Image (cartoon, rainbow, N blue to C red):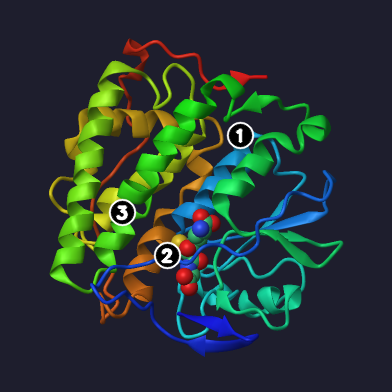
Amino acid sequence: MGLLIEGRWHDQWYQTSKDGAFQRENAQRRNPLPAAEAGRYHLYVSLACPWAHRTLILRAIKGLEPLIEVSVVSWLMGEHGWTFDQQQGSSGDHLEALQYLHQRYTQDDPHYTGRVTVPVLWDKQQKRIVNNESAEIIRIFNTAFNDLTGNTLDLYPEPLRATIDALNARIYPAVNNGVYRAGFATSQDAYEKAFDEVFNELDQLEALLGRQRYLAGEYLTEADVRLFTTLVRFDAVYHGHFKCNLRRLADYPNLSNWLRELYQWPGVAGTVNMEHIQKHYYMSHKTINPNGIVPKGPLQDFGLPHDRERLAGKGIWQA
Ligand SMILES: N[C@@H](CCC(=O)N[C@@H](CS)C(=O)NCC(=O)O)C(=O)O
Protein backbone atom coordinates (compact mmCIF):
# COMPACT_ATOMS: atom_id res chain seq x y z
CA MET A 1 0.00 0.00 0.00
CA GLY A 2 1.29 3.43 -0.77
CA LEU A 3 0.70 6.77 -2.42
CA LEU A 4 1.75 9.03 -5.27
CA ILE A 5 4.04 11.97 -4.57
CA GLU A 6 4.50 14.32 -7.52
CA GLY A 7 3.33 11.51 -9.80
CA ARG A 8 5.77 8.91 -8.42
CA TRP A 9 4.64 5.82 -6.52
CA HIS A 10 5.89 5.32 -2.95
CA ASP A 11 5.17 2.16 -0.99
CA GLN A 12 4.17 3.43 2.46
CA TRP A 13 1.72 2.38 5.21
CA TYR A 14 -0.84 4.80 6.66
CA GLN A 15 0.51 7.33 9.10
CA THR A 16 -1.50 7.97 12.23
CA SER A 17 -1.54 11.24 14.15
CA LYS A 18 0.47 11.80 17.34
CA ASP A 19 -2.29 10.32 19.48
CA GLY A 20 -2.45 7.17 17.35
CA ALA A 21 -5.67 8.06 15.52
CA PHE A 22 -6.23 7.04 11.89
CA GLN A 23 -6.99 9.95 9.58
CA ARG A 24 -8.58 9.34 6.20
CA GLU A 25 -7.40 11.57 3.38
CA ASN A 26 -10.12 13.54 1.61
CA ALA A 27 -10.85 12.51 -1.97
CA GLN A 28 -9.33 15.01 -4.40
CA ARG A 29 -11.45 14.73 -7.52
CA ARG A 30 -14.91 16.09 -6.89
CA ASN A 31 -16.30 17.12 -10.28
CA PRO A 32 -19.88 16.87 -11.52
CA LEU A 33 -20.56 14.71 -14.56
CA PRO A 34 -19.66 16.65 -17.76
CA ALA A 35 -22.60 15.15 -19.69
CA ALA A 36 -24.81 12.08 -19.46
CA GLU A 37 -23.68 9.74 -22.24
CA ALA A 38 -23.86 5.98 -22.52
CA GLY A 39 -20.44 4.31 -22.70
CA ARG A 40 -18.45 7.48 -21.94
CA TYR A 41 -17.55 6.68 -18.32
CA HIS A 42 -15.71 3.79 -16.74
CA LEU A 43 -15.95 2.80 -13.09
CA TYR A 44 -12.97 1.37 -11.20
CA VAL A 45 -13.86 -0.53 -8.05
CA SER A 46 -12.57 -3.00 -5.53
CA LEU A 47 -15.17 -5.60 -4.58
CA ALA A 48 -13.64 -5.53 -1.11
CA CYS A 49 -14.04 -1.82 -0.53
CA PRO A 50 -17.16 -0.57 1.26
CA TRP A 51 -16.92 2.85 -0.42
CA ALA A 52 -16.65 1.43 -3.92
CA HIS A 53 -19.41 -1.02 -3.05
CA ARG A 54 -21.86 1.88 -2.65
CA THR A 55 -21.32 2.84 -6.29
CA LEU A 56 -21.91 -0.74 -7.50
CA ILE A 57 -25.22 -0.87 -5.66
CA LEU A 58 -26.41 2.43 -7.13
CA ARG A 59 -25.25 1.28 -10.58
CA ALA A 60 -27.37 -1.87 -10.19
CA ILE A 61 -30.47 -0.24 -8.70
CA LYS A 62 -30.41 2.60 -11.23
CA GLY A 63 -30.08 0.29 -14.24
CA LEU A 64 -26.70 1.73 -15.22
CA GLU A 65 -24.93 -1.55 -15.98
CA PRO A 66 -25.33 -1.24 -19.77
CA LEU A 67 -24.12 2.40 -19.69
CA ILE A 68 -21.14 2.28 -17.36
CA GLU A 69 -18.60 -0.52 -17.62
CA VAL A 70 -16.64 -1.62 -14.56
CA SER A 71 -13.10 -2.82 -14.00
CA VAL A 72 -12.38 -4.62 -10.73
CA VAL A 73 -8.98 -4.40 -9.05
CA SER A 74 -7.30 -7.32 -7.31
CA TRP A 75 -8.26 -8.07 -3.73
CA LEU A 76 -4.62 -7.67 -2.74
CA MET A 77 -3.45 -4.14 -2.06
CA GLY A 78 0.29 -4.66 -1.77
CA GLU A 79 3.47 -2.75 -2.57
CA HIS A 80 1.99 -1.28 -5.78
CA GLY A 81 -1.37 -0.44 -4.23
CA TRP A 82 -4.39 -1.53 -6.26
CA THR A 83 -3.41 -3.69 -9.24
CA PHE A 84 -5.11 -5.37 -12.16
CA ASP A 85 -3.48 -8.73 -11.41
CA GLN A 86 -5.91 -11.30 -12.75
CA GLN A 87 -4.24 -14.09 -10.75
CA GLN A 88 -5.53 -12.30 -7.66
CA GLY A 89 -9.11 -11.60 -8.49
CA SER A 90 -8.91 -8.60 -10.82
CA SER A 91 -11.02 -8.40 -13.96
CA GLY A 92 -8.05 -6.68 -15.61
CA ASP A 93 -8.32 -3.09 -16.80
CA HIS A 94 -10.96 -3.31 -19.52
CA LEU A 95 -9.92 0.03 -21.00
CA GLU A 96 -6.18 -0.08 -21.60
CA ALA A 97 -4.87 -3.15 -19.81
CA LEU A 98 -3.05 -1.02 -17.24
CA GLN A 99 -1.09 -2.87 -14.55
CA TYR A 100 -1.76 -0.53 -11.65
CA LEU A 101 -4.57 1.83 -10.72
CA HIS A 102 -2.05 4.56 -9.90
CA GLN A 103 -1.36 4.77 -13.64
CA ARG A 104 -4.92 6.09 -14.07
CA TYR A 105 -4.27 8.78 -11.50
CA THR A 106 -1.09 9.93 -13.24
CA GLN A 107 -2.91 10.00 -16.57
CA ASP A 108 -5.30 12.41 -14.93
CA ASP A 109 -2.40 14.44 -13.50
CA PRO A 110 1.24 13.49 -14.11
CA HIS A 111 2.11 15.27 -10.83
CA TYR A 112 -0.66 13.75 -8.71
CA THR A 113 0.11 13.67 -5.00
CA GLY A 114 -2.11 11.62 -2.71
CA ARG A 115 -3.54 8.20 -2.09
CA VAL A 116 -4.76 6.11 -4.97
CA THR A 117 -8.23 5.06 -3.91
CA VAL A 118 -11.29 3.34 -5.32
CA PRO A 119 -13.91 4.07 -6.49
CA VAL A 120 -12.85 6.12 -9.51
CA LEU A 121 -15.27 7.39 -12.14
CA TRP A 122 -13.18 7.87 -15.27
CA ASP A 123 -14.12 9.97 -18.31
CA LYS A 124 -12.90 8.15 -21.43
CA GLN A 125 -13.44 11.21 -23.61
CA GLN A 126 -11.49 13.78 -21.60
CA LYS A 127 -9.14 11.16 -20.08
CA ARG A 128 -9.75 12.61 -16.64
CA ILE A 129 -11.04 11.40 -13.31
CA VAL A 130 -14.52 12.84 -12.93
CA ASN A 131 -14.86 11.96 -9.28
CA ASN A 132 -13.24 9.65 -6.72
CA GLU A 133 -15.56 10.27 -3.77
CA SER A 134 -18.17 7.55 -3.39
CA ALA A 135 -20.63 9.82 -1.58
CA GLU A 136 -20.68 12.04 -4.68
CA ILE A 137 -20.56 9.28 -7.30
CA ILE A 138 -23.72 7.74 -5.85
CA ARG A 139 -25.50 11.11 -6.07
CA ILE A 140 -24.40 11.36 -9.72
CA PHE A 141 -25.71 7.85 -10.41
CA ASN A 142 -28.94 8.64 -8.58
CA THR A 143 -30.08 11.26 -11.11
CA ALA A 144 -27.63 12.10 -13.92
CA PHE A 145 -28.57 9.30 -16.30
CA ASN A 146 -32.34 9.29 -15.69
CA ASP A 147 -33.16 10.62 -19.18
CA LEU A 148 -31.15 7.84 -20.80
CA THR A 149 -32.39 4.98 -18.64
CA GLY A 150 -35.92 6.14 -17.79
CA ASN A 151 -35.16 4.96 -14.27
CA THR A 152 -36.53 7.56 -11.87
CA LEU A 153 -35.94 5.74 -8.59
CA ASP A 154 -34.66 8.36 -6.16
CA LEU A 155 -32.47 7.38 -3.22
CA TYR A 156 -32.00 11.00 -2.14
CA PRO A 157 -35.49 12.47 -2.48
CA GLU A 158 -35.93 16.14 -1.73
CA PRO A 159 -38.35 15.78 1.21
CA LEU A 160 -36.04 13.32 2.98
CA ARG A 161 -32.74 15.11 2.36
CA ALA A 162 -32.43 16.73 5.77
CA THR A 163 -33.09 13.38 7.47
CA ILE A 164 -30.62 11.56 5.21
CA ASP A 165 -27.94 14.23 5.68
CA ALA A 166 -28.32 13.99 9.47
CA LEU A 167 -28.05 10.19 9.35
CA ASN A 168 -24.96 10.32 7.14
CA ALA A 169 -23.35 12.91 9.41
CA ARG A 170 -23.53 10.60 12.41
CA ILE A 171 -23.11 7.18 10.72
CA TYR A 172 -20.03 8.10 8.65
CA PRO A 173 -17.70 9.04 11.53
CA ALA A 174 -19.01 6.51 14.04
CA VAL A 175 -19.59 3.44 11.88
CA ASN A 176 -18.40 3.65 8.23
CA ASN A 177 -15.11 5.26 9.17
CA GLY A 178 -15.38 4.24 12.83
CA VAL A 179 -14.46 0.61 12.13
CA TYR A 180 -11.33 1.80 10.29
CA ARG A 181 -10.49 4.18 13.13
CA ALA A 182 -10.66 1.19 15.50
CA GLY A 183 -8.73 -1.13 13.19
CA PHE A 184 -5.95 1.24 12.18
CA ALA A 185 -5.48 2.94 15.57
CA THR A 186 -1.92 2.79 16.85
CA SER A 187 -2.72 3.64 20.47
CA GLN A 188 -5.02 1.93 22.98
CA ASP A 189 -6.89 5.19 23.64
CA ALA A 190 -7.58 5.93 19.99
CA TYR A 191 -8.77 2.34 19.50
CA GLU A 192 -11.09 2.40 22.52
CA LYS A 193 -12.57 5.76 21.56
CA ALA A 194 -13.41 4.50 18.07
CA PHE A 195 -14.66 1.17 19.43
CA ASP A 196 -17.07 2.90 21.83
CA GLU A 197 -18.39 5.14 19.08
CA VAL A 198 -18.99 2.15 16.79
CA PHE A 199 -21.08 0.28 19.34
CA ASN A 200 -22.90 3.31 20.74
CA GLU A 201 -24.06 4.13 17.24
CA LEU A 202 -24.96 0.52 16.41
CA ASP A 203 -27.06 0.40 19.59
CA GLN A 204 -28.93 3.51 18.50
CA LEU A 205 -29.45 2.22 14.97
CA GLU A 206 -30.72 -1.09 16.35
CA ALA A 207 -33.36 0.83 18.33
CA LEU A 208 -34.27 3.00 15.33
CA LEU A 209 -34.77 -0.04 13.09
CA GLY A 210 -37.04 -1.55 15.73
CA ARG A 211 -39.42 1.35 15.14
CA GLN A 212 -39.19 1.84 11.38
CA ARG A 213 -38.42 -0.15 8.26
CA TYR A 214 -35.49 1.90 6.93
CA LEU A 215 -33.11 4.48 8.36
CA ALA A 216 -35.00 7.49 6.98
CA GLY A 217 -38.45 5.98 7.65
CA GLU A 218 -40.67 4.21 5.15
CA TYR A 219 -38.37 4.69 2.16
CA LEU A 220 -35.13 2.92 1.37
CA THR A 221 -32.54 5.66 0.71
CA GLU A 222 -28.83 6.18 0.18
CA ALA A 223 -28.43 6.22 3.96
CA ASP A 224 -29.37 2.52 3.98
CA VAL A 225 -26.99 1.74 1.12
CA ARG A 226 -24.12 3.52 2.87
CA LEU A 227 -24.68 1.61 6.11
CA PHE A 228 -25.26 -1.70 4.31
CA THR A 229 -21.81 -1.81 2.72
CA THR A 230 -20.16 -1.46 6.11
CA LEU A 231 -22.42 -3.86 8.00
CA VAL A 232 -22.28 -6.63 5.39
CA ARG A 233 -18.52 -6.76 6.17
CA PHE A 234 -18.92 -6.51 9.94
CA ASP A 235 -18.90 -10.10 11.19
CA ALA A 236 -16.56 -11.37 8.48
CA VAL A 237 -13.93 -8.66 8.87
CA TYR A 238 -14.43 -5.77 11.27
CA HIS A 239 -15.33 -7.94 14.25
CA GLY A 240 -12.02 -9.82 14.13
CA HIS A 241 -9.56 -7.97 11.93
CA PHE A 242 -10.47 -4.48 13.19
CA LYS A 243 -11.15 -5.68 16.77
CA CYS A 244 -14.76 -4.40 16.82
CA ASN A 245 -15.78 -7.34 18.95
CA LEU A 246 -18.12 -6.12 21.68
CA ARG A 247 -20.94 -7.75 19.75
CA ARG A 248 -21.37 -9.35 16.33
CA LEU A 249 -23.84 -7.88 13.91
CA ALA A 250 -25.68 -11.20 14.23
CA ASP A 251 -26.34 -10.25 17.87
CA TYR A 252 -28.46 -7.29 16.74
CA PRO A 253 -31.81 -8.68 15.54
CA ASN A 254 -33.12 -5.54 13.82
CA LEU A 255 -29.86 -4.67 12.09
CA SER A 256 -29.46 -8.31 10.98
CA ASN A 257 -32.95 -8.51 9.52
CA TRP A 258 -32.60 -5.09 7.86
CA LEU A 259 -29.26 -6.24 6.39
CA ARG A 260 -30.91 -9.33 4.92
CA GLU A 261 -33.72 -7.28 3.40
CA LEU A 262 -31.18 -5.04 1.66
CA TYR A 263 -29.07 -7.99 0.55
CA GLN A 264 -32.18 -9.53 -1.02
CA TRP A 265 -33.13 -6.29 -2.78
CA PRO A 266 -33.07 -6.85 -6.59
CA GLY A 267 -29.51 -6.33 -7.85
CA VAL A 268 -27.78 -6.07 -4.48
CA ALA A 269 -26.65 -9.67 -3.77
CA GLY A 270 -24.68 -9.68 -7.02
CA THR A 271 -22.55 -6.81 -5.75
CA VAL A 272 -21.43 -8.64 -2.59
CA ASN A 273 -18.27 -10.73 -2.93
CA MET A 274 -17.15 -12.24 0.36
CA GLU A 275 -14.02 -13.80 -1.11
CA HIS A 276 -12.68 -10.39 -2.19
CA ILE A 277 -13.79 -8.86 1.10
CA GLN A 278 -12.05 -11.34 3.38
CA LYS A 279 -8.91 -11.81 1.27
CA HIS A 280 -8.41 -8.08 0.84
CA TYR A 281 -8.44 -7.09 4.48
CA TYR A 282 -6.64 -10.06 5.96
CA MET A 283 -3.98 -10.30 3.22
CA SER A 284 -3.32 -6.59 2.55
CA HIS A 285 -2.93 -5.20 6.05
CA LYS A 286 0.38 -6.76 7.02
CA THR A 287 0.89 -4.45 10.00
CA ILE A 288 -2.18 -5.90 11.70
CA ASN A 289 -2.15 -9.43 10.26
CA PRO A 290 1.50 -10.11 9.32
CA ASN A 291 1.08 -13.69 8.12
CA GLY A 292 -1.92 -12.92 5.95
CA ILE A 293 -3.96 -15.86 7.27
CA VAL A 294 -7.58 -15.52 6.13
CA PRO A 295 -10.16 -16.90 8.58
CA LYS A 296 -12.43 -19.68 7.32
CA GLY A 297 -15.52 -18.43 9.15
CA PRO A 298 -17.96 -17.16 10.06
CA LEU A 299 -20.90 -19.07 8.61
CA GLN A 300 -23.30 -16.46 7.24
CA ASP A 301 -26.40 -16.62 5.03
CA PHE A 302 -27.82 -13.24 4.10
CA GLY A 303 -30.40 -15.02 1.96
CA LEU A 304 -32.32 -16.28 5.01
CA PRO A 305 -35.83 -14.89 5.53
CA HIS A 306 -36.10 -11.51 7.26
CA ASP A 307 -38.92 -10.12 9.34
CA ARG A 308 -39.05 -6.57 8.02
CA GLU A 309 -42.55 -6.83 6.52
CA ARG A 310 -43.85 -6.25 10.04
CA LEU A 311 -42.94 -2.57 9.59
CA ALA A 312 -44.57 -0.24 7.03
CA GLY A 313 -42.38 0.27 3.98
CA LYS A 314 -42.77 1.93 0.59
CA GLY A 315 -39.53 0.76 -1.06
CA ILE A 316 -37.49 3.29 -3.03
CA TRP A 317 -38.98 6.72 -3.74
CA GLN A 318 -40.18 7.10 -7.34
CA ALA A 319 -39.60 10.61 -8.69
N1 LIG B 1 -13.57 8.99 0.50
C1 LIG B 1 -13.35 7.91 -0.35
C2 LIG B 1 -12.58 6.83 0.36
C3 LIG B 1 -12.20 5.72 -0.56
C4 LIG B 1 -11.15 4.79 0.06
O1 LIG B 1 -10.51 5.11 1.06
N2 LIG B 1 -10.98 3.59 -0.54
C5 LIG B 1 -9.99 2.66 -0.04
C6 LIG B 1 -10.42 1.22 -0.24
S1 LIG B 1 -11.64 0.67 0.89
C7 LIG B 1 -8.72 2.79 -0.84
O2 LIG B 1 -8.75 2.78 -2.05
N3 LIG B 1 -7.60 2.89 -0.14
C8 LIG B 1 -6.30 2.95 -0.74
C9 LIG B 1 -5.36 3.76 0.10
O3 LIG B 1 -5.81 4.41 1.04
O4 LIG B 1 -4.18 3.74 -0.19
C10 LIG B 1 -14.68 7.41 -0.87
O5 LIG B 1 -15.62 7.21 -0.09
O6 LIG B 1 -14.80 7.24 -2.08
- Which comes sooner in the sequence, label 3 or label 2? 2
Q: Which residue is mark 2?
A: 24
**Secondary structure type for disc 3:** helix
Look at the picture and state if 59 lies above or below 102. above
Image quarter hosting the C terminus: top right
Seen in the picture, residue 146 relative to 230 is either above or below; the reply is: above
Residue 214 occupies which quadrant of the picture? top left
Circles 3, 2 touching at the beta carbon (< 8 Å): no
Note whether 156 is above or below 233 in the view shown: above
Report the side of 314 relative to 103 (left or right).
Answer: left
Amino acid under label 1? Ile
Q: Is residue 286 visible?
A: yes
Tell me the CA gap for discs 2 and 1: 28 Å
Label 3 vs label 1, nearer the camera: 3
Q: Which residue is mark 3?
A: 178
Give the residue pinned by disc 1.
61
